[in-house]
Image: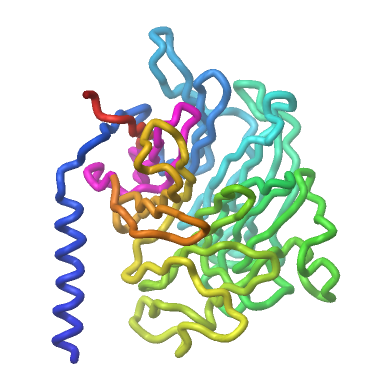
Amino acid sequence: MKYVLACLVTLLAWAASAQAQAPAAGHRIETVATGLVHPWSLAFLPGGRMLVTERPGRLRLIEPGPDGQPRLRPEAVAGVPPVLARGQAGLFDVVLDPDFANNRRLLLSFAHGTPEANHLRVVRAQFDGRQLLEVQAIFTSAPAKSDTQHFGGRMAWLADGTLLFGMGDGNLERTDAQRLHTHLGKLMRINADGSVPGDNPFVTRAGAQPEIYSLGHRNPQGVVVVDGVPYAHEHGARGGDELNRIRPGANYGWPITTGGVDYTYARVTPFRSLPGIEPPLVEWTPSIAPAGLAWYDAALFPAWRGSLLVAALVERSVRRVPMAKGLPGPQELLFQEVGERIRDVRTGPDGAIYLLTDSPNGRVLRVVPAAP
């Protein structure tokens, strides 16, 4: 049996390798900016400008130069709050307020505190083109946790104007993902000013953190809303990465159900599924290490319309997951010719696909159709 399993794993690896080695067709990849230190997230501003977060705690601006080509401003945006940058901790996501054109507000998520007592924090601020003003904390996870792993940090706006974002389990006391007194291992929902929506699923539960929207997550690092429906993916351990459709109050299982095993190859749990646990739409074993998540429905690549795009660190790819009536179809591996860890993937206002590479000399890349 062990021999058969080994052969099957080898065959699957060979098939994935063969697919990765197929010549890229139909697109070309341009470099927008280089010299970024572990870039984590990207947001598009009016006028062809972009904001990029760097995990060490800097917010950078890309803007058109005198020749019209994008260039990275040498100086970082001023006014970013102090960030705990150690291990997996750092500056994470940047998203624009839905009314950014009028109020100039944006949101940042980051690790706050010390290695011994830290939190996921979300702030909102005004951006005047060079610096952040009126910085205000609107969420700080509780209670404080130790160590610098599994912060989550991705954010997305729901259709009703509330903010959905993820918090990892901290990777110490994993069962906290099942406990409602802590934000660890949860997705949260708040109003734009940080107040708690009155219809959150646990807002009246005694002892529960009222911001909790769903539970049982290991380390969610991708959130996107499609036609009002939120989707999120999360890192498993050695396998068990998941893509989920998010429902208020639902339990997604970690650590009492998972398709993966621990890094030591020990079983995390004997259960892959249980009554009352929401099953994943997609599970990836072996792990691909899903990082960013985007929705593609633009005209530039007609064959890719109606797809979720999953940035993958370990696989060094983007997985295209076509969706039909809320169900995933056969996946396609994209952009492995980049040969780097892909931290984030975004659909630009121009219909192009933008990638962030995760390294000390990280890049912003733009994917456009190949020249005829």
Instruction: Please give the name of the residue rendered at 21% of the width and 38% of the height, measured from the top-left corner.
Output: 25
Range of the magenta residues?
Answer: 335-362
The image position of residue 219, as x and y in percent, is 52, 64
Picture residue at 36% right of the left edge, 36% below the top = 301
Q: Is residue 189 magenta?
A: no
**Whether residue 245 is visible:** yes
Position of 276 with respect to 74 (left or right) is right
Task: Name the residue nearer the viewer: 294 or 365.
Answer: 294
Q: Position of residue 296 (x, y in %)?
A: 45, 42
Asked if residue 350 lies in the magenta stretch, the reply is yes
User: Which residue is at the front of the view, 358 or 44?
Assistant: 44
Question: Which quarter of the figure has residue 6?
Answer: bottom left
Q: Residue at x 55, y 57 (%)?
A: 231
Q: Is residue 16 left or right of residue 59?
A: left
Q: Is residue 56 left or right of residue 29?
A: right
Question: 215 or 320, which lies in front?
Answer: 320
